[in-house]
Image: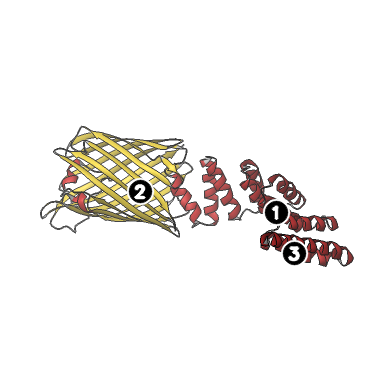
Amino acid sequence: MKNHILILQKHLINLALLLLVLLVVPSTRAGENLDSLFVEARHAAIELENRALAIELCRHALEVNPNYHDFRILMGRCYSWEGNYDKAEAELGQVVEAVESYQDARNALLDVYTWSKQDDKALDLLESSVQMYPNDVGYKLKQLMILESQGKISDATAVADEILLIDPVNKTVLEYKNRITVSEITRSTTLRYTYNRLAETNTEWQFLVVEPSLDPWHWISLEHKESFSFGPIIIKLNYANRFKNSATQIEVESYPVLRKGTYLYTGIGLSKSDLFPSFRMGLEIFQALPNDFEASLGFRYLEVPDNQIPIYVGSLGKYWQSYWISVKTYVSPSNSSLSKSWVLGVRKYLANPSNHIELYAGSGVSPDANLGGEEIDFLGSRSFGVNFKIEIKSQYDLNLGMSLSNLETRTDAFRGDSGIQVSFTKNY
């Protein structure tokens, strides 16, 4: 009974307010009263959450002055909040048509299109909004989100690049760029060459090899990425020449996307030569976390002559301004360098994510690196490196890298390794 009385009192108060407005507005100066009425209508819509009263107040005001657009915008928003998108679109569309540069009306209509899942209408309105306000990052971000949701990755990436010209450290765009590296609908072909100079050293801290005492290590890799709706598949053909021996290896990797922010890494490799592991496989799940973090857990498995090695892997990374900072560790029950491996990397994005420089340092052998069969049994290692990626032309990327490492091949016996890497990628 008490609740019914309260509801009745609320309706009586709203009715009294409406009658008061209807009586007062025509009797005095309309401009001043309409300003006061807008405050009351906004209060009714937002504070009282009485959208019906707010709409009635807006209707009355528009009868007095049809060009008082703030009332029509407020009425359109009330309709949209109530889920009446057709009426909201009709009211807000009138304002956008009458005053094209009115951003409040554009933003309200964009919300209507977004909430009612009218993506094509939203994109049309965003296109004209971007032309009118080319430096407004907000409009471009909305374009990016809609295009990505539609699977139009190439168009979304073009918008992302435009945003980075205005705001090079935009976190949303950098996250998007990192996300689509494993899920974008595209294809690419990469040719990679690696050269390593090797020499026996007297200490574990000699990295730069000036006079090689061992045959160098040549590595050529040809890889092709083809993407599907579930994510990309990468096929690699590797050729190695070392100690006057040659070998080949085939690898297949994929990055299936499970949901937004969650994807897998899967990989398998086969070789008939001891220069490579005869069999390798991997599985790892990556998950985006709050505050721009990303974590992963997984495993690797390697087979070399007379040895089968399981390896557990985990990583944690974070975006900070225009940097991507990550640490990855590999844990194995074996007595080799794989049992105590970690890699710390810091990537700095430059003009856009297609251009970046990355520094890394590590200890132990990484099963994800260019790994020969014999390195698995080494006792330990220390390594440093730098990679520089640059977009030399639209659809063409160049990657340059240099690495320095020292490996403990057996107790108190060390090997220095200085290498360079060059790769060229054609994106389709």
**For residue 40, which numbered disc appears in the image?**
3
The tag earlier along the polypeptide, 1 or 2, is 1
Q: Position of residue 108 (x, y in %)?
A: 67, 53
Q: Nearer the viewer, mark 1 or mark 2?
A: 1
Say which amino acid is labelled 2. Leu
Rounded to the nearest angstrom, the CA distance separating label 3 from label 1 is 14 Å
Position of the N terminus, as image quadrant, is bottom right
Q: Nearer the viewer, mark 3 or mark 2?
A: 3
In the displayed structure, 53 sits above or below 149; it is: below
Q: In front here: 102 or 44?
A: 44
| Residue that appears at 73% across and 60% down | 8
Dot 1 alpha-carbon crowd within 10 angstroms: few under 14, some 14 to 19, many 20 or more: many
Say which amino acid is labelled 1. Cys
Q: Secondary structure at mark 2?
A: strand
| C-beta proximity under 8 Å, tags 3 and 1 | no
**For residue 213, which numbered disc appears in the image?**
none
The tag earlier along the polypeptide, 3 or 1, is 3
Tell me if I can see residue 229 in this picture. Answer: yes
| Residue that appears at 35% across and 48% down | 400
Q: In front here: 214 or 332?
A: 332
Q: Secondary structure at mark 1?
A: helix
Q: Position of residue 386 (x, y in %)?
A: 33, 54
- Is residue 368 left or right of 41 when viewed as pictured? left
Dot 2 alpha-carbon crowd within 10 angstroms: few under 14, some 14 to 19, many 20 or more: some
Q: Read off the residue under disc 1.
A: 78
Q: Position of residue 161 (x, y in %)?
A: 52, 49
Rounded to the nearest angstrom, the CA distance separating label 1 from label 2 is 56 Å
| C-beta proximity under 8 Å, tags 3 and 2 | no
Tell me if I can see residue 352 in this picture. Answer: no
| Residue that appears at 12% across and 57% down | 202
Q: Position of residue 253 (x, y in %)?
A: 34, 38
Q: Read off the residue under disc 2.
A: 400
